[in-house]
Image (cartoon, rainbow, N blue to C red):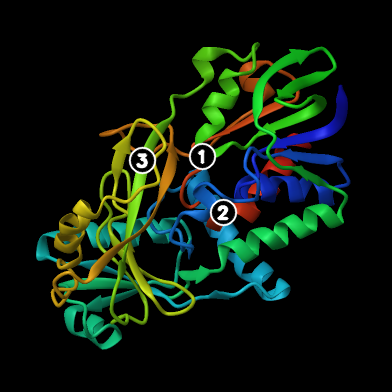
Amino acid sequence: MEKADCIVIGAGVIGLAVARELALAGREVIILERAGAIGTGTSARNSEVIHAGLYYPPGSLKARLCIEGKSRLYAYCLERGVEARAIGKLLVAAREAQVPKLAAIRENAERNGVRDLVWLSSEEARTVEPEVRCTAALFSPSTGILDSHAFMLTLQGDIENAGGVIAFKSAVVSGRAQSDGIVLSTQETEVKAKLVINAGGFRAPAVAQSIDSMPRHLIPRAYFAKGNYFALKALSPFKHLVYPMPEAAGIGIHATLDLGGAVRFGPDVEWIETIDYTVDEKRAPLFEEAIRQYWPALPENALAPSYCGIRPKITGPGEPSADFLIQGPRDHGLEGLWNLFGIESPGLTASLAFGAEFRKRIMT
């Protein structure tokens, strides 16, 4: 049996950020990753947006870590040469009936500490984005985009430079708690550690289920909310991100620019039972209808299936989205085990702040 100080399960952006904090603190860290590379799940299948923190309930972990993480992320990317741009975002009320909701989002954002939002009339919004049609809009100048894979590669470099190791193709199949640590079994070996962090993304509940002493009633059910994206076949008509009003389980089918200037639309919300990364081209009419609410000039047959991601939710259809859940020994009684559940958006934005938050928790 191998022995280690700390084991992190999962090399997505949260697992990498947590492992980096531990490694930089002088801890011996091993990451067990089921895939053959870092960030192949939710971390690689999203909008690559740096969120400003508009929507999340004041006082929630999502709100606090998003705001803090945004500042940390821009600073880190600048320091390390990772491409990140604060290109700004328009959040639009397409109809008069949506204006009160837009005002409520502004109030919520201000309570979260977001002080840079600009309220725009319909005419003012058209000066920012001439193709957009709306009744009113909020402009968020600190919302941006980044090269998420380059960011994760840089985190990996920090971990390895501090002595950490990533074991690829090492899926955790079972675990058991002992008096002196947690024993994890992969298909190849067993490893024991005093500190185990389950950062398995949408597989985190399944990983927790595989640990024999983990109280089952404390493991949330995993819900898979698939988000599909369609690419625009033509040149982008936008210079900024364009978002509609948020919807249940998501923030609406929005226009996202990549660092090369191409535009894609998504994600929608498609509840599924099993992991499936295919994009059904028959969903295009749903996208067209949503997009034309704020961009009426969308041409016919201008969308092509692009890619999709899976949100690691712990609440289901019709339920409000849960906050990030950091579950430790005081919650379940297993010394050394930490479970990270429901780490969906804004996980990428919050990742560096999440790592710092976790380091603080295990040291107190």
Quarter occupied by the N terminus: top right
Tell me which corner region of the image, top left, top right, bottom left or bottom right, holds residue 176.
top right
Q: Residue furthest left?
A: 96
Q: Please say if 234 is above or below 171.
A: below
Name the residue furthest bottom. Answer: 127
Above or below 64: residue 271: above
Of the image marks 1 and 2, the number of the one nearer the N terminus: 1
> Crowding near pointer 1: few (<14 within 10 Å), some, many (20+)?
many
* Residue to which mark 2 is pinned: 350
Residue 24 x %, y %: 83, 52
Q: CA distance from mark 3 to mark 2?
A: 20 Å
Amino acid on which disc 3 is placed:
Ala
Residue nearest the viewer, comparing 91 with 29: 29
Looking at the image, residue 100 sits to the left or right of residue 82; the answer is: left
The mark that comes first in sequence, 3 or 2, is 3
**Tag 1 residue:** 324
Q: Position of residue 195 (x, y in %)?
A: 78, 30
Question: Looking at the image, which is closer to me, 301 or 22?
Answer: 301
Q: Is residue 72 visible?
A: no
Dot 3: element: strand
**Left or right relative to 136: residue 325:** right
Q: On the image, numbered disc 3 is attached to which residue? A: 225
